Image: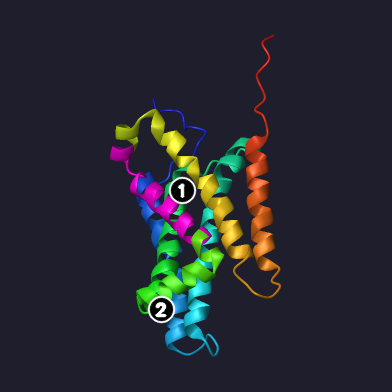
Amino acid sequence: MAPAPSGRRRSRFSPLTRQIFLYLFGLLPAVLVLAQGMANMLGPNPVSACLHEFGRWAFRFLLISLAVSPLRRFAKLDFMVYRRPLGLLAFTYAAFHVVFYAGVARHFDTHVLWKDFTSRPFLTFGLLTFLILLVLALTSTRRAIMALGRRWAKLHKLVYVAMILASVHYTIAFKTWHVEPFIYAALAAGLLALRLVPKQTKRVA
């Protein structure tokens, strides 16, 4: 007798394979931005355009990764298997953003970098965001999860601190009015607000 079909449809790909596919797919915007830059399709300042695009994509993937838990809790949509690659994509684009700024825009000139950091406060918020994402990326492996035990969950709550720092970094980065950073900050505030919603306790009949 054939076994009854289960209610949930099984994917032909393992969770790890799907995570790898998502991560590689998430790198396509970087390839597109670099290709446009080399083809002189990003305006008069392609370096600045690439730099800002990498930063925006880092913020986008950070927001999407933090939306996974609220989606499961409030909309019953389970994308938890994709949260790790989304977080790693946020870190990857943040790393592109930092390396592009320090290497391509400033040519690793320590004098210029020091002058930038002492005169532009938004860079400090950006660096702190990157350092937090670096720690979270390094501790996202199964070995790190096992080694840290209960401390792992507490450590990875720093992602919300990173989101706040990224919001400040993006909001004060421009000398003129830009509405987009405030949209991102509003989305970040919304995700934080959802986290503060108390969980409903099941009533015993």
**158 in relation to 200, above or below:** below
Magenta span covers which residues?
125-144
Query: How far across and down, in percent of the image, does residue 81 sit?
Result: 45, 44
What label sits on residue 82 in the rendered view? 1
Nearer the observer: mark 2 or 1; the answer is 2
Query: How far across and down, in percent of the image, does residue 96 sit?
Result: 41, 68
Q: Give yes or no for residue 187 being in the magenta stretch.
A: no
Question: What element does badge 1 sit on?
Answer: helix
Q: Is residue 185 left or right of residue 32?
A: right
**44 in relation to 176, above or below:** below
Q: Of the residues shown, which amino acid type is indicated by label 2?
A: Arg
Q: Which residue is mark 2?
A: 106
Q: Quadrant of the N terminus?
A: top left
**42 in relation to 136, above or below:** below
Query: How far across and down, in percent of the image, does residue 201 sit?
Result: 65, 20
- 77 and 135: which is toward the camera: 135
Coloration mode: rainbow
